[in-house]
Amino acid sequence: MFADRAVLYCRAGDGGNGCSSFRRETFVPRGGPDGGDGGNGGDIIIEADRNVGSLNNLIGHRHWKSERGEHGMGALCTGKCGEPTIIRVPPGTIVRDLEHGHLLRDLQEHGDTVTIAKGGKGGRGNKRFANSVNRAPRECEGGHPGEYREVELELKIIADVGLIGKPNAGKSTLLSRVSRATPEIANYPFTTRYPNLGLVQLGYDHEYVLADIPGLIEGAHEGTGLGHEFLRHVERTRLLVHLVEPSPMDQTDPLENYLTIRNELRLYDSKLAERPEIICVTKSELPDAEACAELLEEQTGQQVFRISAVTGQGLPELNRRIVAALQELQPVEVTPTPLPESVDASAEAGEIAASEKPSLNTD
C-alpha cells in the first residue's frame, strides 16, 4: 500500500497550572509565597525525514496529542514541560490547514520542520503575584490550553527523472532493469497503481533518482483514471522520459498516444509541457519499433532512443543521455502559495483552543 495523502487531527499539550503555596519552615515566620509556575505543554511538529518513503504510517494514526506540562509545586518548583511530538514525513510533503486551506509549509529538504500546534503556556504560581502591597497572594493562574489544528498532508515525490507514458508502455520494466527497484510487472494495463522510485547508478560518479509514474490516459488532467493523483508526482521532476509503445495492445496509434500524453501535461500544468523530455520507443525488438521511432523523429524533430528492457538494447546510451541532461538542469523550484497578509498562521491555530482565557485559582 502506498499513501500520498493523509488528514491529521492534532492537539498540543496544555500548560500546567501554577501553584499556590507558602513557605512553612521552623524559625521562618511568614515565609511568603513560594508557588512555582506550571510547565509548558508540548508542541506538535512535522519533520521531513528522508528515511520515510510514504505516508503509510499515518493512515492508522490520525489523532495526535502531545504531553501536557506538569503543575507547579511549592518551594518555587516549576513543573516539567511536556515533550514535543514529532511526526515524520517524506521530503516533498505539503502541509495545509484543513479548515482554511492555507499552505503552512512545503517540506522539501531533509530536516525541514513546521510547528502545526503550539503547546499551552504554563500558568503562573502565586509567587508571581506578590508585590509591595499584596505580599501574601493566594491566587495562581491555570495553564493555557494547547492549540488544536486539523491538517492535510499531500506527498509529491521528489525525483530527478520521471517516466511517463500510456499504460503498459514498459515503464516498470525499464525501472527494474536500470535500478534495484522491484515494481510489480505484468502484461496488462495499470499494473502500476502508485509511483515507484529507484536509484540509478552510472559508474562511481553519477547517480539519479528515477520515478515510475503510473500510466496516463486521455482526460487525466480532469482526474480521469486517477489522473490528478498521478500527475502531481511529475511536478518536481527535472527531466521527463516519455516511453512510447510501438504496438499497443489496444491497437491505438503510437503517435496519437504520444500527442495525447503531451496534451494532458499541458492541460494539467503548462510548465510541465515545457519540461525537458527524452523520447524513447520501447520494446525495440518488435518489428514495428523502427518505423515508429522514425515517425516520431519526423514529427517532433528530436532524437528518439530505441530501447528494450528485455534485450538491454539502448539502455547504456539512454543512461548517459539522462546524466548529461541532468548536469545542465537546475532543480525545480517550487514556490509555495503565501498566506494572506491578514492571516497569522501561528496565531490562527490557537483561535479555537485558546478562545477562553486561563482562569485564576484562589485558595
Image (cartoon, helix red, strand yellow):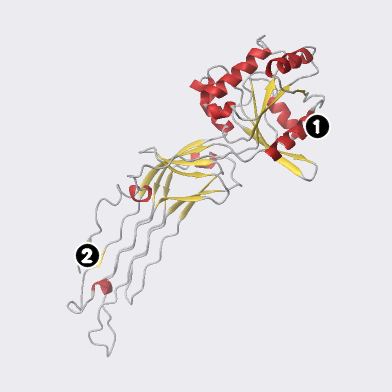
Q: Residue furthest front?
A: 301
Q: Residues within 10 Å of mark 2 (few under 14, many from 20)?
A: some
* Whether residue 160 can be seen here: yes
Identify residue type, mark 1: Pro
Instruction: State left or right for residue 315 relative to residue 40.
Output: right
The numbered disc on residue 346 is none
Distance, label 2 to label 1, CA atoms, is 75 Å
- Label 2 or label 1, whichever comes before in sequence order: 1
Say if 175 sits above or below 102 in the image. Answer: above
Say if 135 sits above or below 244 in the image. Answer: below
**Percent position of residue 353, x then y:** 30, 49
Reading the image, the residue beneath label 1 is 316
Instruction: State left or right for residue 104 relative to residue 279.
Output: left
Quadrant of image for the C terminus: bottom left
**Percent position of residue 314, x then y:** 80, 26
Q: Residue furthest bottom?
A: 27
Kindly identify the residue that appears in the image at 75 percent across and 17 percent down: 293
Kindly identify the residue that appears in the image at 37 percent across and 62 percent down: 40
Determine the secondary structure under disc 2. strand
Quadrant of image for the N terminus: top right
Identify residue type, mark 2: Asn
Instruction: State left or right for residue 331 relative to residue 339.
Output: right
Instruction: State left or right for residue 109 relative to residue 13.
Output: right
Give whichever of 351, 299 is nearer the camera.
299
Reading the image, the residue beneath label 2 is 361
Q: Quadrant of residue 27 in the image?
A: bottom left
**Percent position of residue 125, x then y:** 28, 70
Q: Residues within 10 Å of mark 1 (few under 14, many from 20)?
A: few
Determine the secondary structure under disc 1. helix
Kindly identify the residue that appears in the image at 61 percent across and 35 percent down: 237
